[in-house]
Image (tube, grey):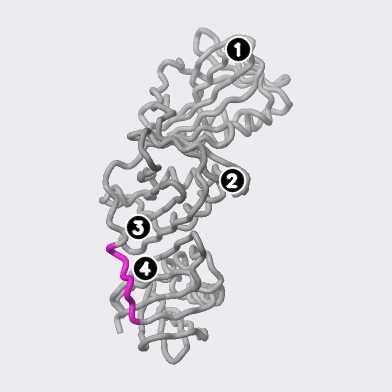
């Protein structure tokens, strides 16, 4: 195999491929990039760690066709340090790869392309096209609430429900949950013979985090999504990003949210975040033989009093709020509370509460047409 790459082209193509390279595996093939040189002048690059994968096609001058695997980290590092506009890659019959640029060259071993793991089916009868910016915004709002390494596998990801004209995203880790639903135009809908579009699936946490990096917040950018029985595939420009789905039924997220709270406060979002960030100087301070302290909220007579105390000091703030219902003192993990409030897409938010031991809801003070957001967080038990 012999290929001549444009350096900037191949570097731009390899960067997103690295998210699907296995770092620690007994299989050296999934630590590599599958490079397939095809005439006329096409090169297909693929990485796949058995959970998620990325495939892209770039233009290159193919002098001799071939299909080989190169270690992804070494290949990426080598092309970065090469000086020049063109990089030549050759692989001989002895599985020796040579990367050269000008008078510089670097050799490494290659593996046979046939040893690369088989890829899942990357097309499906169940598909649709949606706006990348809408998808990016929604998963950004709920991703903080996804669990990591929870024994309940379905919580280790984001639940997505697709209907004819809307997308809903839900995440929950047992301490906090987030739900966002938005009416949006979906194009090229393939309902697999059904009358309406009705798909629901759970995307793993690592896939969600990588997807958020790959998709754009450009209002004009689109992505086509294919859903198979076990996998999901995203076509993002020239990039194909695919992942295994989490098998199982998601929790009843509606049942765990209390909808008839006795107390509500309406508060300026940025003022509250600023006060909580000041409290974080105390609550997140790590001192030997001490645990992180909680933030204490007291709702009384149109004021929200925010305080925190640790072994090294204390903090106190007051914010004027619109208050409906009895007074209440309640405490939270401060970082969980900040993340939930920050995710709410509104300048003024409504917080609904009932008691010091029941969950609270955070949502926009004024509902926006075609959009639903609600964030739930559990309080912590106060020592005093």
Q: Distance between the residues labelled 4 and 2?
A: 29 Å
In the image, residue 132 sits, relative to residue 227, either above or below, namely: below
In the image, what residue occupies the spot 45% across and 33% down?
53
Q: What element carries label 2?
A: loop
Residue 194, horizontal then vertical, whole percent:
35, 37
In the image, residue 163 sits, relative to residue 32, either above or below, namely: below
Q: Which of 38 and 199 is in front in this view?
A: 199
Instruction: In the displayed orientation, state which residue is furthest to the front.
Output: 195
Residues packed near mark 3 inside 10 Å, few (<14), some (14 to 19) or many (20 plus): many
Residue denoted by label 4: 377
Which span is picked out in magenta?
A: 255-262
Where's the N terminus, which quadrant? Answer: top right
In the image, residue 280 sits, relative to residue 202, either above or below, namely: below
Residue 207, horizontal then vertical, whole percent:
43, 43
Q: Nearer the viewer, residue 108 or 238?
A: 238
Residue denoted by label 3: 172
Q: Is mark 1 on a helix, strand or loop?
A: loop
């Amino acid at each position: 195999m012999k290929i001549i790459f444009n350096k900037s082209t191949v570097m731009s193509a390899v960067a997103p491929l690295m998210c699907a390279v296995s770092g620690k595996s007994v299989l050296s093939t999934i630590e590599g990039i599958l490079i397939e040189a095809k005439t006329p002048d096409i090169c297909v690059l693929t990485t796949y760690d058995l959970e998620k994968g990325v495939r892209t096609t770039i233009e290159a001058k193919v002098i001799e066709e071939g299909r080989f695997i190169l270690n992804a980290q070494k290949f990426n590092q080598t092309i970065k340090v090469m000086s020049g506009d063109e990089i030549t890659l050759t692989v001989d019959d002895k599985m020796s790869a040579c990367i050269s640029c000008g008078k510089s060259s670097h050799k490494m071993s290659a593996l046979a392309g046939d040893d690369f793991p088989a890829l899942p089916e990357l097309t499906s009868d169940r598909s649709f096209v949606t706006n990348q910016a809408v998808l990016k915004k929604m998963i950004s709002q709920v991703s903080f609430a996804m669990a990591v390494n929870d024994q309940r596998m379905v919580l280790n990801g984001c639940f997505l429900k697709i209907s004819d004209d809307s997308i809903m995203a839900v995440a929950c880790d047992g301490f906090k949950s987030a739900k966002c639903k938005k009416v949006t135009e979906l194009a090229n809908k393939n309902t697999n013979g059904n009358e309406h579009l009705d798909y629901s699936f759970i995307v793993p946490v690592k896939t969600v985090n990588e997807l958020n990096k790959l998709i754009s917040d450009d209002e004009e950018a689109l992505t086509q999504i294919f859903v198979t029985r076990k996998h999901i595939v995203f076509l993002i420009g020239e990039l194909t990003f695919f992942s295994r789905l989490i098998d199982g039924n998601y929790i009843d997220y509606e049942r765990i949210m209390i909808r008839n709270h006795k107390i509500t406060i309406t508060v300026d979002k940025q003022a509250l975040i600023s006060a909580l960030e000041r409290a974080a100087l105390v609550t997140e301070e790590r001192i030997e033989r001490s645990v992180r302290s909680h933030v204490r909220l007291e709702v009384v007579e149109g004021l929200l009093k925010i305080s925190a105390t640790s072994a090294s000091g204390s903090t106190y703030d007051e914010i004027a709020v619109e208050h409906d219902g009895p007074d209440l003192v309640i405490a939270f993990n401060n970082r969980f509370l900040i993340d939930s409030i920050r995710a709410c897409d509104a300048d003024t938010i409504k917080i609904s509460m009932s008691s010091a031991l029941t969950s609270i809801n955070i949502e926009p003070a004024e509902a926006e047409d075609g959009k639903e957001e609600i964030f739930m967080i559990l309080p912590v038990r106060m020592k005093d």
